[in-house]
Every structure is written in structure tokens, then in C-alpha cells.
């Protein structure tokens, strides 16, 4: 009887182990660690450094003397405590500030914890690309990389400065680290983007030397995308300055890069974030011409009638 009980217990144990193994094979995600795989730049293609433009729209880039208007202690708090996350800077927080970008004027924007600004909607993508297809939104890749703001002291801030044409919005990633932040060897990094009312953009890299236990070559822009793109898939309307290739002319600790918008960016207004799309005036012109044409026909008809 005792042997039968033991035998049954062994069978039960064996079946349980078998069932768990089957479950593990069928649903690897259940048993795998919830952490995402470490990023490797090798899988993303060769590093690329691009020219200063202009792109099809007319944006150009130039290296400028390093400046840094620190808002780490004065800016409005946007977020902290995230690996991959985005938050909106709502129109109400921007006091009427608008920003023209690829012919669209925005009164709001989305900021990601991974060094990316997007328009229209947010992106929490951590895998930086070459701006051909990703992100799908129009975007400013300040230092798009797998960053992490879960460490103590990390935070993302924004602040409006100046007035009139000199008005500018500063967005600052303050003391953020590379994923995975909890590694003791990580060094915090600080950088910012300045969005000017006229559509110009300046990147200021205060300190972007970091440390990543997964990759020795992620520091100082070596694993990041720096540039801008319009919405949708892009061949022409993008200015890709550096892709996994820092430090270089455009990106690195103690460097500033100015992206200048063409004058047309300030005059063509097709849409704002919270207002309906302004219709093209073609319809109005057509209607006016039709009215004129009808009027001429009527006048000719009266004139002919008078002659008869
Ligand atoms: Ca991240
Ligand atoms: Ca990367």
C-alpha cells in the first residue's frame, strides 16, 4: 500500500513536470524574463553620418558654439521613473507658443523618455532607427536611444523662455541613464532641445557620456539617432545627421547643433494640433470663377436678346 502511494506520488510529480515543460515550450513568454533583450547596434545596420542638408523641405544643419540654458532646476516637470514612455506637453501648458515643423504649425507635442519628440501622437519606441519609416509621426530625434529615467535624480523638464520672436521652448532630459539604469556603473546624462518660434531647433549636449553594461559602444551618441523627419515614410523630408555614429560633428558631449528651418516653414500653415485642418482656398477660387463665368453668360444672353 505504501509503495502504491509512493508510486502514485512519483507519477503525479512526473506528469506535473511534463505539463509545465509543455506549457513552457508553448508559451515561452510566460517563462521568459519580462525584460526586453539588450539592444545591439549590429542589428541596426552600419553607422551613418549625414551631410548638413538641405533636405527636400529646406532644413539645414550646422555645428554652432556650445551653449546650455539649464532648466533642470527651473523647468516644469514632465516625467520621471520610466524606461519607455511618452507624455504630451498640452496646448494649455504652452501659453500660446506654436512651433512650425515641415509646414504644419503645432501648439502641442509629445516627448518620449527615449530622447524623441513627436507631433500629433506619442512614441515610446526605444529602438532608434534611421528616420526612413520610424517613428511614423513627424519627429525630432534629439538623442533617440534606449534611455532610462528610473534612477534617482532623473527627470524630463520643459520651459518657455523669451518673448515675441525670441520665444523658445526648452525640453531637457536631466540626469537620465541608458537602459538598464539599475546597473551601478551607469553614469547620468543631460541634454536638451530648444524649439524656436520660427521653426529652428537647437540640440545642446551637456553630457551624454554614459555607460551600458550590454554595449561598450553606446556612449556619446554611438547608439543614437540625431535628426528630424516629416510624418510618414520619408526619402526627402528628413534630415538624418547621425545614426549610431557619435561622437561626431553633430553629436557629442559639449556640442551644439542648430537645425535651421526654411522661411517657408513660417508661412505655410496647414494644420494645428487642436484646430481643424484649414481647407485649401482652391475651392473658393473655383467658386468665384464659376460665379464670374455665369455672370458673363447672363450678360451675353441679355445683350444678344437686346440685339434681336
Ligand atoms: Ca528606454
Ligand atoms: Ca540605440
Image (cartoon, rainbow, N blue to C red):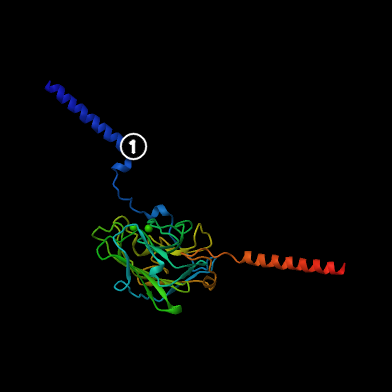
Residue 240 seen from this side:
no
- Across and down, in percent, residue 278 comes to 54, 65
Q: Is residue 223 above or below residue 68?
A: above
Q: Report the side of 159 relative to 18 (left or right).
A: right
Dot 1: what SS?
helix
- Which of the 4 image quarters holds residue 187? bottom left
Which residue is located at x 32 percent, y 41 percent?
Answer: 28
Viewport quadrant of the N terminus: top left
- Across and down, in percent, residue 244 comes to 40, 60
Observer-nearest residue: 43 or 101? 101
Observer-nearest residue: 55 or 262? 262
Which residue is located at x 35 percent, y 58 percent?
Answer: 85
- Which of the 4 image quarters holds residue 286? bottom right
Q: Report the side of 197 relative to 72 (left or right).
A: right
Q: Is residue 43 above or below residue 80?
A: above
- Across and down, in percent, residue 29 comes to 32, 43
Q: Is residue 66 above or below residue 281?
A: below
Determine which residue is flagged by label 1. Answer: 26
Q: Residues within 10 Å of mark 1 (few under 14, many from 20)?
A: few
Viewport quadrant of the C terminus: bottom right
Residue 7 seen from this side:
yes
Residue that sits furthest to the left in the current view: 2
Q: Report the side of 113 relative to 232 (left or right).
A: left
Residue that sits furthest to the top in the current view: 1
Which residue is located at x 30 percent, y 64 percent?
Answer: 176
Does the Cβ of the disc 1 residue fall within 8 Å of ligand 1?
A: no
Which residue is located at x 52 percent, y 70 percent?
Answer: 265
Observer-nearest residue: 147 or 109? 109
The quadrant where ligand 2 appears is bottom left
Amino acid at each position: 500500500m505504501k509503495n502504491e502511494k509512493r508510486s502514485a506520488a512519483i507519477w503525479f510529480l512526473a506528469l506535473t513536470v511534463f505539463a509545465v515543460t509543455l506549457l513552457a515550450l508553448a508559451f515561452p513568454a510566460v517563462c521568459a524574463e519580462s525584460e526586453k533583450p539588450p539592444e545591439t547596434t549590429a542589428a541596426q545596420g552600419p553607422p551613418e553620418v549625414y551631410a548638413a542638408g538641405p533636405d527636400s523641405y529646406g532644413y539645414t544643419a550646422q555645428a554652432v558654439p556650445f551653449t546650455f540654458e539649464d532648466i533642470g532646476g527651473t523647468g516644469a516637470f514632465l516625467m520621471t521613473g520610466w524606461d519607455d514612455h511618452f507624455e504630451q506637453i498640452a496646448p494649455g501648458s504652452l501659453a500660446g507658443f506654436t512651433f512650425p515643423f515641415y509646414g504644419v504649425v503645432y501648439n502641442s507635442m509629445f516627448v518620449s523618455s527615449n530622447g524623441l519628440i513627436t507631433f500629433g501622437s506619442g512614441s515610446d519606441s526605444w529602438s532608434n532607427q534611421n528616420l526612413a519609416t520610424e517613428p511614423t509621426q513627424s519627429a525630432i530625434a534629439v538623442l533617440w536611444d534606449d534611455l532610462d529615467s528610473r534612477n534617482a535624480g532623473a527627470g524630463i523638464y520643459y520651459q518657455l523662455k523669451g518673448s515675441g520672436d525670441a520665444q523658445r521652448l526648452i525640453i531637457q532630459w536631466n540626469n537620465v541613464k541608458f537602459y538598464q539604469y539599475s546597473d551601478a556603473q551607469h553614469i547620468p546624462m543631460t541634454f536638451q532641445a530648444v524649439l524656436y518660434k520660427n521653426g529652428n531647433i537647437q540640440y545642446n549636449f551637456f553630457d551624454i557620456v554614459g555607460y551600458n553594461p550590454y554595449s561598450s559602444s553606446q556612449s556619446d551618441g554611438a547608439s543614437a539617432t540625431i535628426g528630424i523627419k516629416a510624418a510618414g515614410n520619408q526619402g526627402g523630408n528628413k534630415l538624418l545627421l547621425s545614426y549610431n555614429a557619435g561622437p561626431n560633428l553633430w553629436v557629442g558631449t559639449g556640442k551644439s547643433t542648430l537645425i535651421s528651418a526654411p522661411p517657408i516653414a513660417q508661412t505655410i500653415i496647414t494644420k494645428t494640433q487642436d484646430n481643424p485642418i484649414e481647407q485649401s482656398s482652391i475651392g473658393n477660387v473655383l467658386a468665384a470663377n464659376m460665379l464670374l463665368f455665369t455672370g458673363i453668360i447672363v450678360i451675353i444672353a441679355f445683350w444678344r436678346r437686346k440685339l434681336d
